[in-house]
Amino acid sequence: MFADRADIVIRSGKGGDGHVSFRREKYVPAGGPDGGDGGRGGDVIFEVDDGLNTLTDYRHKRKYAAEHGEDGRKKNCGGKNGTDIVLKVPSGTVIRDAASGKVIADMSGDNRRQVILRGGRGGKGNQHYATPTMQAPKYAQPGQPANELEVVLELKVIADVGLVGFPNVGKSTLLSRVTNAQPKIANYHFTTLNPNLGVVDLDEGKGFVIADIPGLIEGASEGVGLGHQFLRHIERTKVLIHMLDAASTEGRDPIADFYAINKELAAYGEDLSKKPQIIAANKMDAVYDGDDDPVALLRQEFEPQGIPVYPISAVSGQGLKELLYAVWELLQTTDDKPIVFEQEFFPETALYADEPYQVTFDEKEKEYVIEGPRIERMLGYTNLDSEKGFLFFQRFLREQGILKELEELGIQEGDTVRMYDLSFEYYK
């Protein structure tokens, strides 16, 4: 069974606890604290593997966890960092938050590797808390806890062209004739279960990737049959070939079929039904003299709507060249930028939205101070030395309302803001 969806639980590693210990050596009666820091917990990382084309591996195991960081030790020895866990997925996999359905990452295009959950920061050993008035601190910082999240993996095939239509209209036959794909073909009254991809090669280096989207049925958008599992594969395609049984070999009305399929596309998402379409009027080899001309009827109905109709026979090859070149020409008018879903859900902030923080003004130091568990966590998994990390830091301050609170306290450009051991000047 083709696996294009999986529901799994991922968990990053807990940070190791800082250690409480004191130097004890001969002739050194009061050696002071020497507790080491805890190790960082492992990250949960998703990575594209070009050798994979399904999510089968995630159908048999549901929970995946990175390694915890080791606790600190005496003699200033830090704990070992936890090992990251790297989960391999096929290109085109979209990772969503299971609770909200929002996109966390789209493993497509240039996005080949992404950290989804960061491990907890290791706690500081008691050596960091020695002061002139507290020379023997018996306190060490605990490591940050692990982060856990339930996510849904969805594989959305990456193809330029989607081939849609009711079951048994000849989509698999067409795909087998115009590409190197080898779909199973038979006179089934139920649908193909697997999306099949193939490459169409035309003259002078022209070509495109086409996907035989498993046949739709009425009610697919409401989950009837395997509707949702099929419809998701159309989202990345730029052009649709809508295949109809022009000969009505099974007594179906091709015009009614077209509107029924488009109704399902629109119900799933308006963007699907608005994609450019070309009608392939198939099974012309089964149309006999004396019958009404089905192509004329189809053109009369759809060409005023801007949808061209091409008569073909997937069995004999009639009209296929004209159809494929028309599709290629239509693709040249569409945006050639890959369709990649933007990130909507940021685990780093969403998981700790309920944790408190405080924004205050330190009269003695003349600094604005931001503290609290949420702030400490954010600093633990953000690399402020990188451009991406700093942009995330700015967005965090804005989305959490921290910038607004600073302005309400009267902050001015050039004033100093302190977050634990990090200080910076404020600029709008």
Image (cartoon, rainbow, N blue to C red):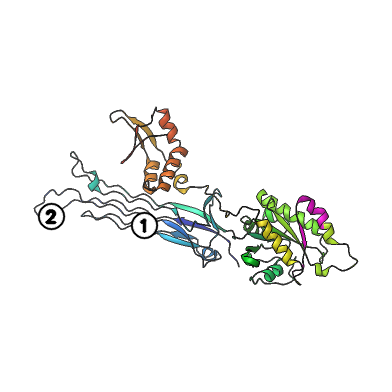
* Magenta residue check for 349: no
Label 1 element class = loop
Image location (x, y in percent) of residue 133: 18, 38
Instruction: Judge by depth and name the residue closer to the eye, 180 or 106.
Output: 180
Instruction: Judge by depth and name the residue closer to the eye, 346 or 176.
Output: 176
Instruction: Judge by depth and name the residue closer to the eye, 173 or 130.
Output: 173
Q: Is residue 358 above or below residue 199?
A: above
Magenta segment range?
Answer: 298-315
Give amino acid for label 1. Answer: His
Mark 1, residue position: 68
Where, by quadrant of the figure, is residue 177 drawn?
Answer: bottom right
Mark 2, residue position: 25
Quarter of the figure with the N terminus: bottom right
Tell me: 390 left or right of 343: left
State the residue at coordinates (71%, 60%): 326
Image location (x, y in percent) of residue 59: 54, 64
Give amino acid for label 2. Answer: Glu
Where, by quadrant of the figure, is residue 215 drawn?
Answer: bottom right
Label 2 element class = loop
In this view, the residue farthest toward the right is 290
Q: Is residue 318 above or below residue 161?
A: below
Category of crowding for the residue at label 1, using alpha-carbon neighbours closer than 10 angstroms: few (below 14), some (14–19), many (at least 20):
many
